[in-house]
Image: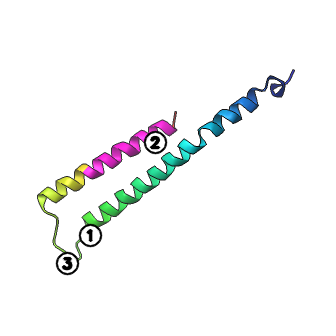
Amino acid sequence: MSPEDTEIPQLQEHAKKLTEVGRSRDCRRFLNDLDQLVSSMLIWSTDDGTRSTLTDVEKRREETHLKRLLNGLEKVVGASCR
């Protein structure tokens, strides 16, 4: 009797395929959030003199947004490691 006879390898492949759509969606969401995070950080950190600096309220808003994105990133990375 071989592993193929038990059909367990085929079942494992089938189970992996069932999650492909969700994993793909999560990866796209992760990449979009990462892109937003990097863009926010670039905007926040760049002061080339052509625009006014962020107010304290805007800085707190950006900090909150970045923390929310980081928490989401940590959840995605943690879930993918399981």
The structure's colour scheme is rainbow
Q: How many angstroms separate mark 2 from mark 3 (CA)?
A: 37 Å
Give the number of the disc on residue 77: 2
Residue wearing tag 1: 46
Indicate the amino acid at tag 2.
Val
Tell me how many marks there are: 3
Q: Residues within 10 Å of mark 2 (few under 14, many from 20)?
A: few
Residue at x 75%, y 32% (from the top left corner): 10
Residue 24: horizontal and vertical position, in percent? 55, 48
Q: Secondary structure at mark 1?
A: loop
Residue lying at 43% horizontally and 56% vertically, measured from the top left: 32
Furthest residue toward top: 1
Q: Return the residue at label 3.
A: 49
Say above or below: 3 vs 57. Answer: above
What residue span does the magenta drawing correspond to? 65-80
| Left or right placement of residue 21 versus residue 76 in this view | right
Q: Amino acid at mark 3?
A: Gly
What secondary structure is the stretch in magenta mostly built from?
Answer: helix
CA neighbours of label 1 inside 10 A, class few (<14), some (14 to 19), many (20+): few
Q: Is residue 71 magenta?
A: yes
